[in-house]
Amino acid sequence: MTHATPLLRQITDYANRANPYPLYEKLRKTPVLQEEEGGPYAISSYYDILQLLHDPRISSEAANLAAPSADDMGGAEQTGLPPSFIRLDPPEHDRLRRIANRPFGPPHRPDRIDSMRDELAAIISGLIDGLGGAGEIDLVDQFAYPFPVTVICRLLGVPREDEPRFRSWVDPIVAALDPDAGGDTAERRRAAQEARVQLGMYLAELVEQRGKEPREDMLSELVTSRGGDGSMTTMEVLSTAVLLLIAGHETTVNLITNGMLTLLRHPDVLDRLRDDPELAVNIVEELLRYEPPVQLVPQRTCIADIELRGVTIPKGSRIWLVLASGNRDPERFAEPDRFDPDRKDIQHLGLGSGIHSCFGAPLARLEAQLALSTLARRLDNPRLLEDPPPYRHNAVLRGPRHLRIGIDGVRP
């Protein structure tokens, strides 16, 4: 890496994936930065990011992108489906999000997430039981990935035997989110489009079945829901289901993996969690600040000129909101580079803010709290076997691809 290399390219360079935080510190020296003509404006300070997340002049609609891409968590545009609601602006965003929320949480189903606590605990216990005796485990493949996949599939009503099929579809879709993954970009997008088609076709069959024979699952409720906002079309149900399946587990995988990695690097906190499971609530909030699974949001566009810190960002410009940089901003957090579960003020950006704040935040929080507290209690003498671990290539959804841990066994 040379000094002439633009800072944003360094941030998206895989060589810096294990520790991008020194680069974020450099980025904050120019809080509104456009390095290359026609390139995005990177916003890196906490208060500026928070302001723009609530600014109606910032659009999430793919149609407003100066250079439309295939990078869509909802996986819709390239398959003939309508955009998922995270790629829409009000009022349509609000309508679809409200409909999706009816079977998911308050005010219609206020106990939906909390009522899953025992089921989540049983899934966690089963996975930990399967780790076996003393030796080496890969926390990602053996726990952090299968746990949230199982949860979101059960919530939506995906048959258990079909759960393993999702990884072959999800991996290429998520890879397309990376703004600079290197390699053959056209091939990466082709693979993502093909995976979206296969996932969409699979879900179309499920939606048709649920329309004829509804069950006690979220997909059935999306198909049959009727209320003040009307109902979703079949195509809207499909794009929402794709979004929930992918977003419903990808960030949680990284949150759990980043969390266990951080705890193993801070054994004193791990010991405290082992003795006090309630500490998991604070730990997860601090993790969302300190090692957020979503590092940046590269899919925003100005639909009007915006003045920020003396810089005019022209209408039509792309904006990158570097959430992980804002979470380490010393203007907002004391000792921002210190992991401190006792921090009293953790108003982080780890789950976004504003109308596009994380739809599944209550579930992700509960999954991570239960997972980390149970791992702390049941793994006997866990220790890192590789630090830093190999990371996924994605600069947007950052987390280890594997996390090799040595254990002396599993406690009851």
Image: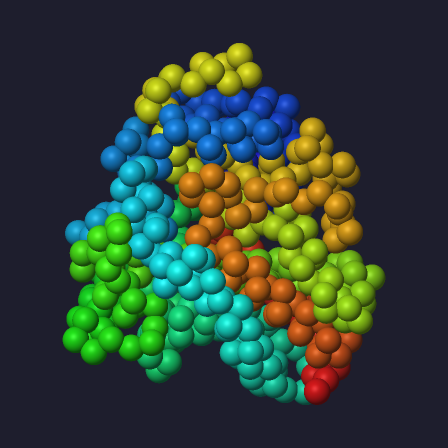
Q: Is residue 308 left or right of residue 186?
A: right
Q: Is the residue 292 above or below the residue 214 in the image?
A: above
Q: According to the image, what is the colour scheme of the structure?
A: rainbow
What count of labels does the image hold? Answer: 0
Name the residue at 26% across, 50% down. Answer: 229
The quadrant in which the N terminus is found is: top right
Q: Is residue 40 left or right of residue 288?
A: left
The quadrant in which the C terminus is found is: bottom right
Q: Is residue 228 left or right of residue 50?
A: left
Name the residue at 77% across, 75% down. Answer: 381
- Outermost residue toward the right? 268
Q: Is residue 241 left or right of residue 364?
A: left
User: In terms of depth relative to the viewer, which is nearer, 218 or 160?
Assistant: 218
User: Which quadrant of the figure has residue 121?
Assistant: bottom right
Q: Is the residue 406 above or below the residue 300 in the image?
A: below
The location of residue 105, given as percent across then percent down, is 44, 60
Name the residue at 78% across, 51% down. Answer: 342
The location of residue 35, given as percent across then percent down, is 48, 23
User: Which quadrant of the figure has residue 219?
Assistant: bottom left
**Residue 84 can be seen in this image:** no
The location of residue 330, given as percent across then percent down, is 71, 32
The location of residue 195, given as percent across then percent down, is 28, 61
**Residue 66 can be seen in this image:** yes
Name the residue at 55% across, 16% down. Answer: 309
